[in-house]
Image: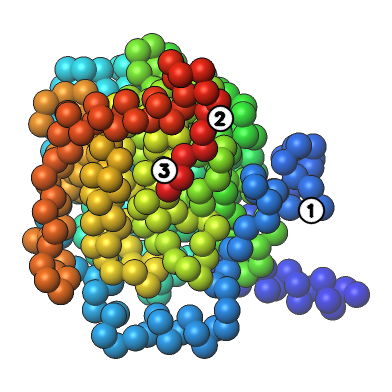
Amino acid sequence: MSAFRSLSSGLRGLQPEAFGVDPSGERLARIRRSPHFKDGVFQNPGGAARIRPSGSTLEFAKVFFDKEERPRRSPKGTIPVHPTTLADIARPPATGLRLTWMGHSSVLAEIDGHRVLFDPVWGERCSPFPFAGPKRLHPVPLPLAALGPVDVVVISHDHYDHLDMPTIKALADTDTLFAVPLGVGAHLEHWGVSADRLRELDWHESTKVGGLTLTATPARHFCGRGLRNTQHTLWASWAVAGDAHRIYHSGDTGYFDGFKEIGAEHGPFDATMIQIGAYSDFWPDIHMTPAEGMRAHLDLQGGPSAGPMLPIHWATFNLATHAWAEPGEGTVAAAHAEGARIALPRPGEPFEPAGEGVPVAPWWRQVAEAPTGGWPAAEPVSEAAIETAAEAAAERKGEGSGEPEAVPVA
């Protein structure tokens, strides 16, 4: 037995630090008391979700390594990153809310005098190893040190493309607080974040940071960083409310009916940040397509006339088999179909959701391979289209008609 313990200890010593650690002690006891933890794992809303490719590994490999499709999964030119400067983000937003998409799911939100940094990933690869794994398709818009003080860092879950050890270690030397789902705090403490700077929440729990209320809301996903997935850390979306504004960050999630409940309780939002990339028929339950992302946005907002949707979780890392530009194109098509507002900034381009000049041009077309027949028209959604869509949504809900609410169809 002692020899076995010695071998086990030795294997743990060989694990990369980026694997983090499993929750233990009172943290693990709190996890086991969670109403969302059952049979040794956290449970997804809507029932069990497929978290690995369905079908055979051979079928997936054929698609992933297809010689004709593989080149379409990366840009054919240099992604036009906006060279964010301190001047861009030093002056307060005129409307009280400004968002800067840093690529993938990383967003700096300046809201009612506070600065929130969602899922910061400044590393070159989303991997436990510096020499392998998905590599950036574009550089970060500005160095982390140039970002300035951040009041709170919000983490959606512990996957490498959302929780980046080098970035967390750099932020551990600052005064920022961290809001994380239940169990994820174990990783952060392992990497040098003191326990008194952690706000670790279960779904539907909230914490106050200055004048902000941050609430962990449900998502349909999974967790895991090491060789085995214990499902002992939670995944979450986040609603953030200030004195005058409300925003929502989806993290990673499949579509589920709970978006309506989140919107009813915490919305409508001045902007939503919605995952629309890295989807696949091989794992349909844990990532949304652009059409599903738009459906989630409309559920959260109660209709198309509320704040815009910022598509996230795309363009920075190659994580699925779809074409690199497909999530952006799909989002434009979904917005036109629903008459909904969207924002399409280049990585690093600040914008105010309620201000003038919200970026809506499909910038990726400059560096993506055009489809057969060329790019479709991509004019901005008109105010008239938004009003028409809002009226149609109101009719579907039975507002003013006395009819029961209808379930929207994607």
* Location of residue 367 by image quarter: bottom left
Q: Amino acid at mark 2?
A: Glu
Residue 369, image x and y in percent? 15, 71
Q: Amino acid at mark 3?
A: Arg
Q: Which residue is mark 1?
A: 40
Q: Which residue is mark 2?
A: 261
Q: Earlier in the sequence, mark 2 or mark 3?
A: 2
Between 204 and 389, the one lying in front of the other is: 389
Residue 340, image x and y in percent? 27, 36
The Cα atoms of the two marked residues, 3 and 1, are separated by: 32 Å
Q: Which residue is mark 3?
A: 295
Residue pictured at 43% horizontal, 15% vertical: 400
Between 273 and 339, the one lying in front of the other is: 339
Q: Earlier in the sequence, mark 3 or mark 1?
A: 1
Note whether residue 176 is visible: no
Secondary structure, mark 1, is loop
Residue pictured at 35% horizontal, 18% vertical: 245
Within-10-Å neighbours for mark 3: few <14, some 14–19, many 20+: many
Marks 2 and 3: CB-CB under 8 Å? no
